[in-house]
């Protein structure tokens, strides 16, 4: 690893630490979901501050106790954060920077492990260019703010790069630690949140496609772990939790744009009088769920299968619904969730403007332009697949499937908070852009150097390949017994002899 790469890594770490640890720290306010994780530890802050501000200090009181049925790999990170808080907090309060430290450490671990992976593929200047691109993307407030939060998406946010890096290391070196890291990080990604459990499909496909490279046993164990973790996350929410999402989809995304609302309600097994709840959320005090009779009737009649049949019967309308979700998600960062502690003096819902160039560019291009965002995303997937060569084509296809599944789940399974729900979709897109940039720099380097950086038989500097198959090892020679000195003639026997030739010179040579 060159000095310039170490400096780039330390610079990225410094920017992340500056945003997450040094006041005024950047966090993402609670929309009400934090209790799914923090409730297990009886920590929280006054509800009046929710969404408006992101307090740094959290109080530990019985009133915040909430043992939710939700299961996520974020729980493990929260346990580690609580242990860290007990060491650094003298007042007994919980500091949100403790969970931020967990997320930031995992991301920086992924970046550190990536550095030696780039060496066989890119020359030094190209590697610096990739690190600068990673800094521009991942140091943006849209990602860093999530580190200081208890959203389950935060776990997926850090396990995406870890999974990708361990996958690349497994292909290059086939070390046990890398193979175990790939299998573990894949399972933790699939188990981060019910919404992201669908990523188990491309992860399993990836392991099957590369089973000869990573080993059939590793692929089988990894696939089993991913499926188990996905089921663990997907089936952990309470049975009636999905009803809230279905309510929002029907009354926020379907009915307000329906040409025949009464007919749609009948198709969804609801009464015509329920049209009065159009444009209300399941969490609104004026919504249908505020009435016990409607709540009971809705949960008895509506389920995922009913909604799926409605989608299949109205593909054009559902496509328009997806475009509206893209239009909302184009803003990239939630407008109704603040980033700062109330003591910092910022107004409610204030968002950090520092290190927001990447998210600002995204918002400039796609905010309120759903069709443009959708077409650009589709074009990215096509470019990702057709530009891949050889073994990388299968990996590109798996990444494209993951992006498409995230878009469908984020856009059609929930009608609220599209910018936040599209966070992992954006990250997978950014991962694709970084992969395309790496491929472009690689081809540029090959064109200039007249060789193939991935072919060790072509003439070039051997430095790039000196560590590719380097396994820790040691050769121990058996000590020879010293021969006693004698004053006699010494004889050397050379075997085998040369093959006999017809025109040898001198003739004594065989």
Image (cartoon, grey):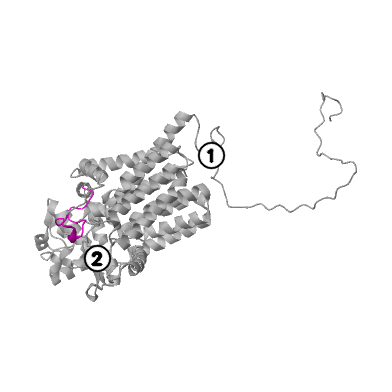
Residue at the image point whose x is 42% and y is 37% from the top: 125
In the image, 396: left or right of 149?
A: right
Badge 1: few (under 14), some or many (20 or more) residues near its Cα, within 10 Å? few
Write the start and end of the magenta stretch as one range: 331-349
Residue extending furthest toward the right: 488
Question: Which residue does the image show at 42% across and 46% down from the upper left?
Answer: 6
Q: Is residue 215 left or right of residue 333?
A: right
- Residue at 42 percent of width and 42 percent of height: 4
Q: Residue 510: percent from the left, percent from the top?
A: 84, 30
Res 46 label: none
Whether 340 is among the magenta residues is yes
Q: Quadrant of residue 397?
A: top left
The verdict on residue 348 being magenta is: yes
Q: Position of residue 215 (x, y in %)?
A: 53, 53
Closer-to-camera residue (262/147): 147
Residue 242 point in image, percent of width and height? 25, 64
- Disc 1 and disc 2: Cα gap in Å? 50 Å
Q: Nearer the viewer, residue 351 or 313?
A: 351
Q: Is residue 296 above or below residue 385?
A: below
Residue labelled with disc 2 = 57
Asked which quadrant contains residue 297, the reply is bottom left
- Taking depth in this image into account, of 102 and 161 the one nearest to the observer is 102
Q: Is residue 88 left or right of residue 464?
A: left
Residue at figure coordinates x 31%, y 39% from the top left? 379
Does 451 appear above or below 282?
above
171, 289: nearer the viewer: 171
- Mark 1 or 2, closer to the camera: 2
Percent of width and height locating residue 20:
29, 56
């Amino acid at each position: 690893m060159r000095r310039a790469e170490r400096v780039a890594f330390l610079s990225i770490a410094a920017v992340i630490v500056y945003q997450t640890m040094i006041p005024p720290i950047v966090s993402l306010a609670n929309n009400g979901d934090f209790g799914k994780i923090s409730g297990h530890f009886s920590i929280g802050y006054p509800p009046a501050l929710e969404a408006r501000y992101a307090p740094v200090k959290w109080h530990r009181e019985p009133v915040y106790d909430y043992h939710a049925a939700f299961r996520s790999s974020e729980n493990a990170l929260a346990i580690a954060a609580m242990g860290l808080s007990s060491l650094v907090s003298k007042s007994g309060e919980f500091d949100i920077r403790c969970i931020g430290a967990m997320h930031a450490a995992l991301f920086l671990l992924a970046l550190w492990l990536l550095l030696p992976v780039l060496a066989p593929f890119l020359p030094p200047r190209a590697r610096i260019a990739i690190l600068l691109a990673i800094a521009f993307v991942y140091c943006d407030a849209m990602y860093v703010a999530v580190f200081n939060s208890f959203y389950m998406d935060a776990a997926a946010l850090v396990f995406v790069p870890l999974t990708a890096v361990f996958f690349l290391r497994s292909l290059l070196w086939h070390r046990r630690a890398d193979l175990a890291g790939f299998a573990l990080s894949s399972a933790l990604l699939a188990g981060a949140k019910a919404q992201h459990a669908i990523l188990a499909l491309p992860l399993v496909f990836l392991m099957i496609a590369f089973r000869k490279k990573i080993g059939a046993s590793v692929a089988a164990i990894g696939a089993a772990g991913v499926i188990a973790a996905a089921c663990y996350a997907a089936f952990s929410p309470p049975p009636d939790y999905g009803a809230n999402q279905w309510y929002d989809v029907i009354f926020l995304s379907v009915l307000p744009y329906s040409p025949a609302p009464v007919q749609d309600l009948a198709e969804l097994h609801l009464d015509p009088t329920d049209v009065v709840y159009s444009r209300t959320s399941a969490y609104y005090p004026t919504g249908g769920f505020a009435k016990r009779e409607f709540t009971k009737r809705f949960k008895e009649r509506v389920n995922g299968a009913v909604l799926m049949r409605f989608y299949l019967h109205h593909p054009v309308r559902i496509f328009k619904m997806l475009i509206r979700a893209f239009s909302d998600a184009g803003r990239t960062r939630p407008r109704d969730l603040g980033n700062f502690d109330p003591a910092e003096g910022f107004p409610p819902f204030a968002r950090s403007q520092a290190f927001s160039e990447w998210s600002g560019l995204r918002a400039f291009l796609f905010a309120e332009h759903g069709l443009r965002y959708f077409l650009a995303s589709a074009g990215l997937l096509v470019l990702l697949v057709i530009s891949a060569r050889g073994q990388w084509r299968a990996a590109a296809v798996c990444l494209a499937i993951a992006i498409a599944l995230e878009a469908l789940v984020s856009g059609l399974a929930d009608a609220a908070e599209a910018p936040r729900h599209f966070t992992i979709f954006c990250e997978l897109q950014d991962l694709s852009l970084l992969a395309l940039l790496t491929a472009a720099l690689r081809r540029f380097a090959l064109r200039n150097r007249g060789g193939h950086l991935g072919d060790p038989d072509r003439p070039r500097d051997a430095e790039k390949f000196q560590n590719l198959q380097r396994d820790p090892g040691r050769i121990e020679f058996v000590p020879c017994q010293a021969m006693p000195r004698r004053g006699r003639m010494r004889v050397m026997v050379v075997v085998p002899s040369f093959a006999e030739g017809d025109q040898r010179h001198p003739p004594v040579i065989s």
